[in-house]
């Protein structure tokens, strides 16, 4: 029947009668859908059907139930698919028992309630603050005295602050053996290990040269504690943020530290001065010893030479006394008069002799020959003054001679 021609009873395809045009009734469409769904679930189409009508509607109901069960089974199986992102690890549990650890990618497990999966981040580096907390936008740190104050071996109190970085190396142990937050576990283990390490160290050692040693021992001890309890946590680094005495005694402690630094500085200066003066003194002492030894050797050698020469002269003197005596006299006079200019005047005859400073004139002439022409002019005045002095000396000498003759 064409769609635009009326059907039986004068109805068109939209259920309208005669010439009435328009869309179908919404309530009627809903009733039709309800009837079809009721047929799928085994319901009857008519209100007063007999036994034959009921037996004919059971087959569509079974088919509908099977379809629904198949769809539910497919959905249940599909719910077992899951994706493990990069940096995560999947822990699969079957009725609460560990089955396997899955890596990144698309994975599948038996759907709930048979199996379940737990995703654990194994690449994220977490930081735990021990002895302080950072809060606020400015990331200002506030001390936590309950964690920071510790007792040293010399019965002093020190305020320590540490930052611990860790990650997960075994997610299975983390799931089964750690019930609390991992940060709480790491903070408690770090505080315990740090108190043990500091309890065997002196205060000055922890504050000065022992910081790196304390950090290394604390890291090793924390890792030992976590491995002993099978937490699956790996300690990456331990950094000491601050180490100082309590605030109440910090001024006095600063004074003591300053005095200790002054002591070290003065000790170093004294050692430097000692290292400088001692080698010098040893060098001077060695030089004096060597000079004394050289003088001793020269005196001994000279004495031995003089003794040998005296013995030789004695031998010659015994052979020819007069000749040896004259030779010794001449040699002695030669040595005495070698470096001196002497003038001897014979005054026999009783005549007045005018003494002239011939030796000085000779020296002046030699100096004039050696002195350059420019310097000769400047020395003329000195020669004139010396000549006047010599004339005055000659006058005094004449007066002395006259007085002696008169006597």
Image (spheres, helix red, strand yellow):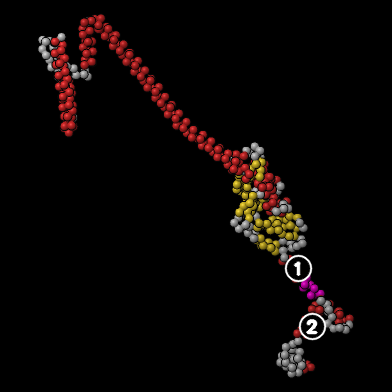
Q: Residue at x 34, y 16 (%)?
A: 299
Is the residue 132 above or below the residue 281 in the image?
A: below
Q: Residue at x 29, y 8 (%)?
A: 311
| Residue on which the image places disc 2 | 31
**In this view of the protein, which residue sits in the foreground, 46 or 350?**
350
The answer to if 69 sits in the magenta stretch is yes
Chief secondary structure of the magenta portion:
helix
Q: How busy is the neighbourhood of tag 2: few (under 14 within 10 Å), some, or many (20 plus)?
A: few
- Which numbered circle lies on residue 73? 1
Please indicate, yes or no, whether residue 166 appears anywhere in the rendered image: no
**Label 2: element kind:** helix
* Range of magenta residues: 62-70
Q: Residue at x 70, y 45 (%)?
A: 228
Res 248 quadrant in image: top right
**Label 1: element kind:** helix
Is the residue 327 above or below the residue 364 in the image?
A: above
Is the residue 298 above or below the residue 163 in the image?
A: above
Q: Residue 85 appears at what percent x and percent y?
A: 64, 60
Q: Is residue 334 left or right of residue 93?
A: left
Q: Which comes sooner in the sequence, label 2 or label 1?
A: 2
Q: Is residue 292 left or right of residue 61?
A: left
Q: Residue furthest bottom?
A: 19
Q: Residue 211 appears at what percent x and percent y?
A: 59, 43
- Which numbered circle lies on residue 144? none
**In this view of the protein, which residue sits in the foreground, 402 or 208?**
402
> Which mark lies nearer to you, 2 or 1?
2
The number of numbered badges drawn on the structure is 2
Res 254 quadrant in image: top right
The answer to if 174 sits in the magenta stretch is no
- Alpha carbon of mark 2 to alpha carbon of mark 1: how far? 30 Å
């Amino acid at each position: 029947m064409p769609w635009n021609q009326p059907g039986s009873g004068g109805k068109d395809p939209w259920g309208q009668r005669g010439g009435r045009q328009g869309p179908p009734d919404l309530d009627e469409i809903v009733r039709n859908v309800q009837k079809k769904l009721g047929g799928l679930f085994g319901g009857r189409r008519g209100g007063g059907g007999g036994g034959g009508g009921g037996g004919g509607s059971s087959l569509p109901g079974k088919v509908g139930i099977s379809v629904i069960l198949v769809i539910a089974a497919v959905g249940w199986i599909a719910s077992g698919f899951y994706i493990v992102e990069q940096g995560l690890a999947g822990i699969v549990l079957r009725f609460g028992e560990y089955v396997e650890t899955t890596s990144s990618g698309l994975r599948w497990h038996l759907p709930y309630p048979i199996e379940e999966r737990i995703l654990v981040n194994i690449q994220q580096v977490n930081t735990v603050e021990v002895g302080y907390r950072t809060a606020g936008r400015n990331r200002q740190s506030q001390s936590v005295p309950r964690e920071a104050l510790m007792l040293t071996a010399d019965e002093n109190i020190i305020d320590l602050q540490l930052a611990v970085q860790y990650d997960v190396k075994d997610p299975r142990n983390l799931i089964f053996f750690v019930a609390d937050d991992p940060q709480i576990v790491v903070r408690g283990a770090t505080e315990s290990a740090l108190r043990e390490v500091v309890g065997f160290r002196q205060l000055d050692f922890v504050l000065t040269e022992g910081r790196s040693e304390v950090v290394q021992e604390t890291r090793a001890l924390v890792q030992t504690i976590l491995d002993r309890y099978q937490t699956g946590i790996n300690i990456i680094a331990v950094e000491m943020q601050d180490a100082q005495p309590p605030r109440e005694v910090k001024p006095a402690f600063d004074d003591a530290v300053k005095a200790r630094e002054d002591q070290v500085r003065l000790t170093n200066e004294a050692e430097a001065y000692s290292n400088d003066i001692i080698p010098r003194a040893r060098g001077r002492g060695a030089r004096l010893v060597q000079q004394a030894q050289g003088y001793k050797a020269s005196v001994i050698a000279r004495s031995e030479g003089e003794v040998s020469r005296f013995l030789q002269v004695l031998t010659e003197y015994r052979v020819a006394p007069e000749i040896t005596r004259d030779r010794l006299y001449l040699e002695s006079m030669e040595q005495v008069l070698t470096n001196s200019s002497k003038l001897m005047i014979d005054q026999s005859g009783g005549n007045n002799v005018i003494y002239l400073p011939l030796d000085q004139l000779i020296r002046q002439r030699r100096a004039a020959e050696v002195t350059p022409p420019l310097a000769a002019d400047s020395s003329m005045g000195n020669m004139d003054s010396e000549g006047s002095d010599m004339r005055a000396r000659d006058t005094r000498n004449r007066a002395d001679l006259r007085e002696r003759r008169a006597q």
